[in-house]
Image (cartoon, helix red, strand yellow):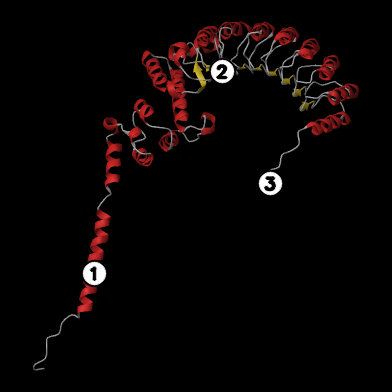
Amino acid sequence: MEGSRPSSVPESVSRRSNAGSVAEATRALKFVVTPLVTLATGVVAEHFSQIKVLDALPDALRRDVEKQLSLTHPLEEAVKYIQDGEYWKARAYDRWKACNVQEHGSSWKQLYVERNLADAIRALHDGVSDEGLDDVRRTASFSARFLNGLVVEEFPTGVDIGQLMDFAHLSMTTLSLTYNKNNVGMAYQKLGRGMLLPDCKFLAKALERTETLTVLRLTANDLDDERVRMLATGISDNITLTELDLSCNKIADRGARSLAKLLGNSSNIAKLVLADNHIHQEGGRALAKALRMNRSLIHLNLRLNRVEDDGSRAIFDSLRNNNTLKELNLSANSISKQGISSCAAMLYMNHSLESLDIGGNHGLNDEIGRLLRESIDHNKGLRKFDATLCDIGDDSLDGINFLLAAKQPPSVFVSA
């Protein structure tokens, strides 16, 4: 039409179009640009071997770096510079399917360090070489600061544990070893399994040097009297050990006598576990003699031995004037009426013992049950008592349980 103005895009539509383009460009820009902090933490993680500045970073940035660190970073360097936390948790689960951090002081770093060293020692089981020994020594050296406990279930026989680890400079408090044969071929049957006499000698010397070890567990190691006597030479010179577990071995009376000598006036041993051994009456009497003078032992477990009446009577008689022992287990020791009668007499006089287990000693009767019930009624300290499978009669057992329940401290309720 003549004189008409050419059509054009409305101004409002043009403004909306430009705004949309700007918004899209802004979103694209935000997507492309990585924050400088993220770039920096990535660089630190990628070049960690050269930078190593984790301790200088704020906690939030340090955690960001640790999340990006390689789980295969050289262990010696990682132990030195990376703190406990998510990195060690991730590294642990990457290597082992089952991880119980509570068994390692609730520290993931401690868990990794302790299990890694145990695996390195266990690897020697397939054949001991100078290179393998050097690897274990080096691992033990850089792990020393973070090593609190060590559990090795297949420690190779014939290897000097004192040469693997410098016990004088370790802060380790718990050591649990189960020895097994390394690759000895046809000689296996001849040598047997468990700790050999040289192994006991090696460990005894190491125990003389340690200044931090408090718990030693050597269960199921085929320890007999001669080997225990060798171990006792090192334990006698140790001033830190408070718990000794030698259960499930072959310790008989001579070995019990050697251990009884460790319970003298200067003893620091508070817990002694000798369950499931071959200790008979003479060994029981030796331990009883030690208990007369001992002022350190709180827990004694002799379950599944054969101290019988003579050994048990000696132990019960020694406790009449012992105010230190709190827990005693003499279950399944072939103790009959004579021995348990001494037990009842002891309970009438000893008010320090808190837990007593005499279960599995068959052939008792209702009369013995009444004696025990009367003694426990008079006793002021006993809180736990087990006479299961002792044939003392249901009435006596029920009466004893009623007496003990009445002596328990009242429950404490906290209001919301």
Q: For mark 2, what is the residue? A: 214
Determine crowd level at label 2: few under 14, some 14-19, many 20+ residues with C-alpha closer than 10 A: some
- Amino acid type indicated by mark 2: Thr
Give the alpha-carbon distance from disc 2 to disc 1, as whole Å. Answer: 74 Å
Question: Where the N terminus falls, by quadrant?
Answer: bottom left
- Amino acid type indicated by mark 3: Ser
Marks 3,1: beta carbons within 8 A? no
Q: Nearer the viewer, mark 3 or mark 2?
A: 3
Q: Residue furthest right?
A: 367
Determine crowd level at label 1: few under 14, some 14-19, many 20+ residues with C-alpha closer than 10 A: few
Q: Position of residue 28 (x, y in %)?
A: 25, 59
In-image side of 3 versus 77 (left or right): left
Marks 2,1: beta carbons within 8 A? no
Q: For mark 3, what is the residue? A: 415
Q: Residue furthest left?
A: 2
Q: For mark 1, what is the residue? A: 19
Q: Position of residue 286 (x, y in %)?
A: 72, 7
In-image side of 13 versus 254 (left or right): left
Helix, strand or loop status at disc 3: loop
N-terminal-most mark, 2 or 1: 1
N-terminal-most mark, 3 or 2: 2
Q: Which mark is residue 135?
A: none
